[in-house]
Image: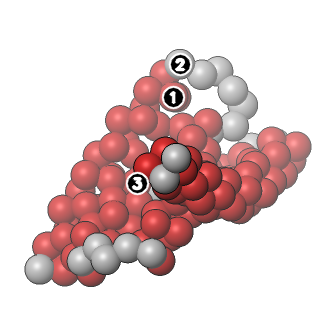
Amino acid sequence: MNLLAVLLGGGIGAASRYLLSRFVAEHSSAPIPLGTLAVNLIGSFLIGFFFQAFKESTARPAFRLFVTTGFLGGFTTFSTYALETINLAEEHEVGYTLLNLALHNGLGLISVIFGMASYSVLKSMISGAFHA
């Protein structure tokens, strides 16, 4: 059951990544690959959010694997980020190479923290609404 959850989540995540990164690429003329940045930042936010949620939840292991290892693992992409960064460097785009590195790593970590905090705020808001 766990393997099936990862397989299904991964397929949905990879298809979602493809669609979102293509959409962003088609609507952007930025000198760095914004499609990859978008999926990695969204995925970083979501992993932080779900990490917090699953710490307090009774969600089944298969569902947790579907979301984290499956969907978010398929949605985000370290390998594409690494390749695109190398391509920028090979094109002698030192400034854009460093910008790509800084945005992915710096904003990725901030996105995880923001996702974790967002879950906590949302939980407090919902809890307060029911206890008012």
Asked if marks 2 and 1 touch (Cβ < 8 Å), the reply is yes
What percent of the width, then of the height, locates residue 96?
A: 80, 42
Q: Which residue is mark 2?
A: 27
Residue 120: quadrant of the picture: bottom right
Give how far apart the Cα atoms at labels 3 and 2 are: 20 Å
Q: Residues within 10 Å of mark 1 (few under 14, many from 20)?
A: some
What percent of the width, then of the height, locates residue 92?
A: 82, 45
Tell me if residue 20 can be seen: yes
Q: Is residue 68 above or below residue 40?
A: below
The nearer-to-camera label among 3 and 2 is 3
Give how far apart the Cα atoms at labels 1 and 3 are: 14 Å
**Which residue type carries mark 3?**
Phe
Residue 64: quadrant of the picture: bottom left
Q: Which color scheme is applied?
A: secondary structure
Residue 71: quadrant of the picture: bottom left
What percent of the width, then of the height, locates residue 128?
A: 54, 50
Residues 62 and 122: in front is 122
Going by the image, does 30 lie left or right of 47?
right
Is tag 1's residue or tag 3's residue first in the polypeptide sequence?
Answer: 1
Give how far apart the Cα atoms at labels 2 and 1 are: 5 Å
Q: Which residue is mark 1?
A: 24
